[in-house]
Image (cartoon, rainbow, N blue to C red):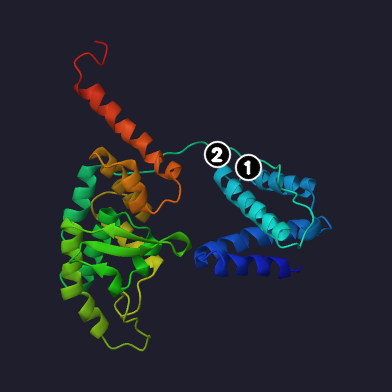
Amino acid sequence: MDTRLLDDFLGHLAVERGASPHTISAYGGDLRAYLKHLEERGTGPASASRDDVIAFVASLQAKGMAPSTVERKVAAVKSFHAFLVREGLSAEHPTIDVSLPKVPERLPEVISIEDASRLLSQPFPEGPVGHRDRAALEVLYGCGLRVSELVALDRDDVDLETGFVRVFGKGGKERLVPISGAAAEAMRDYLSHGRPYLRAKKSRVRQDPAAVFVNVRGGRLTRQAVFGIVRTYGGRVGLKLHPHTLRHSFATHMLQGGAELRALQEMLGHADISTTQVYTHVDRTHVLEEYLTTHPRARLR
């Protein structure tokens, strides 16, 4: 299988669009499966037809893949072919009129304010690791960061005096996110009583002196480690948690508290406000519940 065009595309994603290694890996996996499909049909990406693409979509659906998974893979194929045409590597754009599969709208999973309080008020272990874990959870919920943004934080990105953290989101786009209250307190405790002791440990593994969140050997904390932290502490209070649930909960609770949508968009780092608007649906659910439980004539007797 000739992957030279794919390699060019992945290089474009990395260099010109600033895509993360995780995104590049996902695109690579999806498109290698597409190239194998084309090879089996006796063609290649530069000469692929609309029928080849439709057959690929049908093969994904025949495997019982979820509509959201099929949508992601088709989106990767569309981006790939658009790149080939734009770079003059292909004369045809076989996906230009191929529709993405319809995906049922699914509201983000959130926890209640009470559950967030239980999660963050539980006892944390004594010592540096406990300070780190508490700070990580408080910042995920208190600042609405993505996991990738949390682990990428450098010490110079955190300014507790001004009350902001500098975050580099998708595509390397920079934004400032407020940090205050419990999140700022937990971060201050960790920077004073956690991080210095974790970095002071002797280790054969190369340490990262710039990283805010580090492991017990002084290296930068990984995404997988953060997933484990969230899962562990959630389980201790009876919650099945994913890090993104805390980001969704941050956004939902901000709206419930009266935050403006544009301000929330900026804090979350959404390029398009339509992405942020999904949380208004969650908020309306909250409002409906309040109405049904408090208005004297909201329910038939």
Can I make out residue 124 in this image? no
Instruction: Depth check: give the residue in front, 29 or 76.
Output: 76
Q: Quadrant of residue 34?
A: bottom right
In the shown orientation, is residue 4 left or right of residue 299? right
Tell me what residue is drawn at x 22 percent, y 52 percent.
119
User: Distance between the Cα atoms at labels 2 and 1?
Assistant: 9 Å
Q: Residue 120: x percent and y percent?
A: 20, 55
The circle on residue 194 is none
Tell me what residue is drawn at x 62 percent, y 54 percent.
76
Q: Residue furthest top?
A: 301
Residue 117 to residue 157: above or below: above
Q: Which residue is mark 1?
A: 100
In the shown orientation, is residue 256 left or right of residue 54? left
- Counting every numbered tag in the picture gives 2
Q: Residues within 10 Å of mark 2 (few under 14, many from 20)?
A: few
In the shown orientation, is residue 159 left or right of residue 251? left
Quadrant housing the C terminus = top left
Quadrant housing the N terminus = bottom right
Name the kind of residue labelled 2 in the image: Val
Q: Residue 160: x percent and y percent?
A: 19, 66
Q: Which residue is mark 2?
A: 103
Q: Are marks 2 and 1 in contact (CB under 8 Å)?
A: yes
Q: Residue 215: x percent and y percent?
A: 31, 75
Secondary structure, mark 2, is: loop
